[in-house]
């Protein structure tokens, strides 16, 4: 500690707990575990941290980057440069180096051949990975993996991550496997001790213990969505693998047998089934939903395109089902391992003919959990497909988030009638009859023993009893009632989150995973003299709060990860009287939005349109 | 002495009459083979004494898929998308495993647009009856070739069919079906017995019913026509289904000519050999039979293959005995303690 303080004094402008570090490795080399250990250790030291995996659509061999942002101020969005680089991949070394600004830090495996003249404006730390490995007995199949574990120790020591935090991170990573934990910790310490004895601190970045983040957890949105669904009473999930959605169902598979044992019989209460394609995935989920199970599927854009005909079927037969779309970059196969918000327009009216849907848009890991269980209640209540739009950044990357909160209300199965309910129902009950005037009919499901309970669900025209009908009035009445039913839903949808600036006349609007970037952008704009209020839309269709937000600002910038401003277009439709106030700004590179990008683009627009040069 | 099968009963075991099993009036063409199928499904369910509430009907798109509207009105039904019947059936089957799933599909549904789903639901061994009402033609769209149309079939607007047909029994068999049968809608008694056995079978029961389309594909020379069918149907056995509660009387049969297959609920299928020594529990026998009949252009009808012991998809999940869709919400939401544990594990 004394030595650290001395070092800190000698280096001008020490920067504490505020940096972006990128670890450059080769895909499939097992670097994931090492990276997890580093950011988990930072989190355990109380430092807000996020971890983003920028990876290729490849199994082994291509370059991959892991970006850790630590921010005492709590900013967790991506930044467009690196303060620290850990170079383990010789192929990308020179390119990686260009992301380091002056004063940056380079850790590099010393078997990577450096260019003859290396930049003098950065601090370099060679890491004798191969030499240290030679001195250690490691099974051949674990060699690559353990090389990565070594850099955790070296980087950790130089930055000042404590041995205790690393120990805790290792214990959590290898919970239940004490021997593996020990061998990993020993390897980390080998790097740590070597660095302590051989490296002299010459950069300005320091990690220092902060108050523990006791109310927080560290995980990804797909895990949260899976847990939310399991706590929401999911009983059936049919799915087909697709990046970046697969890890959601895989998380559910890993936890279902523990979480979903029937308290009465000890048997399983949830079925997860991998099927032959996305058509089958949604088809089976609809079959289960129709039959009275809480059912869902999870996919990404290409899968959702395949599911489209089924979405219309669920909509028109009024079958509850939950559909997660963990978005990736499209159109077409696009960029399977990169992030985007490009499916919103498609989902809004997904299906041929007259369709419209409720869409939930979580903006944090915690909300993935919350919307996970709420989606089932909404699907049951409105008897319709409910979409949850996440994306790769939120779904697959690691975020600190508030602890998951237990659902604050019991499961709501909506207007579901069993034998007794049907006995008491009007004698004139019909599956599609609006008995309450709210557009929502009462439904029965298979297994109901009341001889009046059965009906014939069909995607073809039908009357209120489910009988086939081509009668124009029947068709018009049916479709209008469904429209009316969904028109009432906004009151039950998550309201937007508004973060006020100081007497701002300009608004910025976003959704989903861009939240951290936009929060930071709001503060950066304020520093630059432009006050803005920030609204994050959390559901479509929108309601009065969104309307009032737009109405109360001179103009609103809608920032999103798609080309044509899909959220902006929907807001212009739904809040059409203020459509001229909405300006869209698009970011379509496939990487998460950065606050600096958002700030610069808003300032450029302001300058161009209104001559503000601030 | 009066034989039990000749006794016309007004009410079945559960006290219902045939009227309780009826559906809406058919809107298919008069004489359509599918109407015969509807009648025999209805009769089979009635005679087995299943409550209509214990059965669901699922179908795709096409003439075949309209037919579930014409029987079992007291059973839940779902008429979904073209070719996707197996997907709806798979999901629904888990909701209450005591309810019997009956799937109805055509050759367009099963052999073309939904062939993938067909093979995969068979592979999954979803316990259900999968009826293919196979007329070798697209009827509802007014007469196009299907993937089971005979090679050389001539249709008014399409000319001559240049491609060979798929044999759906063969497809089912090689995908792992545990019950494969073929029926001809001109052979009512055999069809009904096959339906009964299929309904009781625990596993995927595929029945390919050759069902002539009287409007678009009933020329005397057409493979799926009444004339061709009657002349080229070769029953491989006389099949009699005996419910578990009934005593099996072998008196009607010559000893040594009857093979008995026991089903899981104690029922039995009695197979009286016709002209060959055919064992439907042997998969390679079944493959040989289908290969031979395909090559020689006839339909071998009857029970082609049965395996009564393979686990179903439901057996692979350790589910409660009571219906999953009746579990109360409290049994579906994990405890707060479990969520606390998760939160701790992610710190």
Image (cartoon, coloured by chain):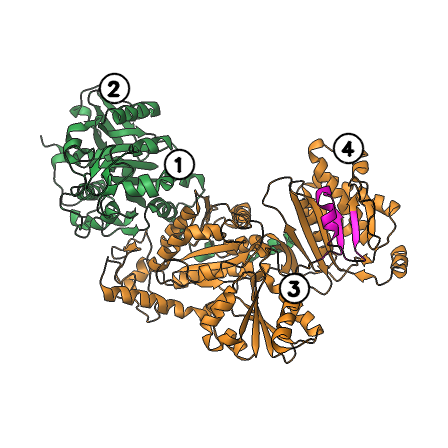
Chain colours: A orange, B green
- Whether label 2 touches label 4, CB < 8 Å: no
- Element type at marker 2? loop
The image shows residue A94 at horizontal and vertical percentages of 74, 47
Identify the magenta region: A81-107
Q: CA distance from mark 3 to mark 1?
A: 52 Å
| Chain at tag 1 | B
The C terminus of chain A - image quarter:
bottom right
Tell me, for residue B319, which label it has, or none.
none
Residue labelled with disc 2: B277
The image shows residue A84 at horizontal and vertical percentages of 76, 54
- Element type at marker 1? helix
Identify the residue at horizontal 32%, vertical 48% (top origin): B82
Q: Name the one closer to the observer, B101 or A48.
A: A48
Q: CA distance from mark 2 to mark 4?
A: 68 Å
| Chain at tag 3 | A
Residue labelled with disc 3: A597
Residue labelled with disc 1: B123
Of callouts 3 and 4, the N-terminal one: 4
């Amino acid at each position: 500690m004394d030595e650290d303080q001395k070092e800190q004094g000698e280096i001008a402008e020490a920067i504490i707990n505020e940096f972006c570090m990128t670890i450059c490795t080769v895909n499939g080399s097992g670097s994931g575990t090492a990276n997890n250990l580093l950011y988990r250790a930072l989190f355990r030291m109380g430092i807000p941290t996020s971890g983003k995996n920028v990876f290729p659509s490849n199994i082994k061999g291509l370059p991959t980057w892991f970006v850790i942002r630590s921010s005492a101020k709590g900013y967790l969005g991506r930044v467009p440069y690196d303060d620290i680089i850990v170079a383990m991949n010789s192929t990308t070394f020179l390119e990686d180096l260009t992301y380091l600004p002056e004063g940056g830090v380079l850790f590099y495996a010393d078997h990577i051949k450096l260019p003859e003249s290396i930049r003098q404006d950065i601090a370099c730390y060679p890491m004798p990975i191969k030499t240290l490995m030679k001195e250690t007995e490691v099974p051949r199949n674990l060699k690559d993996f353990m090389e990565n574990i070594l850099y955790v120790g070296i980087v950790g020591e130089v930055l000042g991550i404590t041995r205790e935090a690393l120990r805790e991170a290792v214990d959590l990573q290898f919970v239940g496997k004490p021997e593996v934990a020990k061998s990993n910790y020993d390897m980390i310490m080998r790097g740590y001790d070597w660095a302590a004895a051989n490296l002299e601190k010459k950069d300005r970045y320091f990690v220092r213990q902060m108050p523990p983040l006791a109310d927080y957890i560290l995980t990804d949105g797909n895990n949260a969505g899976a847990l939310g669904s399991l706590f929401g009473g999911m009983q059936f999930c049919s799915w087909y693998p697709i990046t970046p959605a697969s890890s959601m169902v895989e998380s559910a598979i890993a936890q279902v047998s523990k979480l979903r044992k029937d308290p009465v019989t000890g048997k399983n209460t949830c079925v997860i089934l991998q099927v032959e394609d996305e058509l089958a995935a949604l088809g089976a989920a609809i079959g289960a939903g129709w039959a009275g199970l809480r059912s869902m599927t999870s996919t990404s854009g290409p899968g959702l395109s395949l599911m489209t005909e089924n979405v219309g079927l669920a909509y028109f037969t009024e079958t509850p089902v939950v559909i997660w779309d963990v978005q990736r970059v499209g159109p077409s196969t696009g960029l399977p391992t990169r992030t985007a918000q490009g499916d919103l327009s498609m989902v809004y009216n997904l299906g041929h003919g007259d369709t419209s849907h409720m869409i939930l848009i979580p903006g944090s890991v915690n909300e993935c959990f919350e919307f996970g269980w709420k989606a089932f209640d909404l699907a049951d209540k409105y008897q319709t497909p409910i979409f949850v739009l996440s994306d790769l950044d939120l779904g697959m990357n690691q975020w600190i988030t508030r602890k998951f909160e237990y659902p604050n209300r019991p499961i709501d199965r909506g207007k579901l009638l069993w034998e007794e309910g049907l006995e008491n129902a009007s004698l004139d009950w019909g599956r599609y009859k609006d008995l309450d005037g709210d557009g929502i009919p009462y439904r029965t499901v298979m297994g109901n023993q009341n001889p009046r309970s059965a009906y014939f669900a069909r995607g073809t025209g039908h009357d209120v009893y489910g009988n086939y009908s081509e009668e124009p009035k029947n068709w018009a009445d049916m479709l209008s009632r469904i429209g009316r039913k969904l028109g009432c839903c906004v009151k039950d949808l998550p309201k937007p989150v508004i973060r006020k600036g100081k007497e701002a006349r300009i608004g910025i609007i976003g959704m989903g995973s861009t939240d951290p970037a936009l929060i930071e952008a709001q503060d950066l704009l304020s520093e630059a003299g432009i006050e803005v209020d920030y609204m994050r839309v959390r559901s479509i269709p929108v309601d009065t709060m969104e309307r009032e937000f737009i109405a109360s600002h001179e103009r609103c910038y809608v920032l999103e990860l798609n080309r044509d401003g899909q959220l902006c277009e929907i807001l212009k439709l739904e809040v059409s009287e203020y459509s001229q106030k909405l300006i869209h700004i698009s970011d379509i590179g496939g990487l998460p939005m950065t606050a600096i990008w958002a700030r610069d683009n808003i300032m450029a627009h302001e300058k161009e349109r209104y001559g503000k040069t601030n | 002495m009066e034989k039990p099968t000749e006794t016309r009963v007004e009410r079945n075991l559960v006290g219902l009459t045939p009227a309780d099993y009826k559906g809406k009036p058919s809107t298919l063409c008069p004489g359509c083979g599918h109407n015969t199928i509807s009648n025999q499904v209805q009769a089979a369910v009635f005679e087995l004494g299943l409550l209509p509430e214990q059965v669901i009907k699922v179908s795709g798109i096409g003439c075949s898929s309209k037919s579930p509207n014409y029987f079992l009105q007291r059973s839940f039904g779902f008429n979904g998308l073209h070719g996707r019947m197996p997907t709806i059936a798979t999901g629904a089957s888990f909701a209450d495993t005591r309810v019997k799933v009956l799937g109805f599909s055509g050759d367009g549904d099963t052999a073309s647009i939904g062939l993938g789903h067909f093979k995969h639901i068979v592979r999954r061994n979803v316990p259900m009856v999968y009826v293919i009402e196979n007329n070798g033609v697209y009827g509802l769209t007014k007469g196009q070739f299907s993937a089971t149309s005979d090679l050389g079939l001539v249709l008014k607007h399409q000319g001559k069919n240049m491609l060979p047909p798929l044999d759906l029994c063969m497809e089912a068999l090689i995908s792992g079906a545990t019950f494969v049968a073929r029926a001809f809608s001109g052979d009512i008694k055999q069809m009904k017995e096959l339906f009964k056995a299929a309904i009781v079978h625990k596993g995927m029961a595929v029945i390919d019913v050759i069902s002539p389309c009287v409007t678009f594909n009933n020329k005397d020379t057409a493979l799926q026509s009444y004339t061709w069918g009657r002349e080229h149907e070769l029953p491989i056995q006389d099949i009699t289904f005996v419910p578990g509660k009934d005593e099996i009387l072998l008196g009607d049969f010559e000893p040594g000519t009857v093979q008995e297959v026991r089903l899981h609920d104690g029922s039995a299928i009695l197979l009286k050999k016709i002209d060959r020594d055919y064992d439907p529990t042997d998969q390679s026998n079944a493959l040989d039979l289908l290969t031979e009949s395909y090559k020689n252009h006839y339909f071998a009808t009857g029970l082609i293959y049965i395996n009564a012991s393979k686990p179903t998809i439901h057996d692979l999940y350790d589910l409660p005995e009571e219906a999953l869709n009746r579990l109360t919400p409290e049994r579906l939401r994990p405890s707060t303690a479990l969520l606390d544990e998760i939160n701790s594990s992610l710190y």
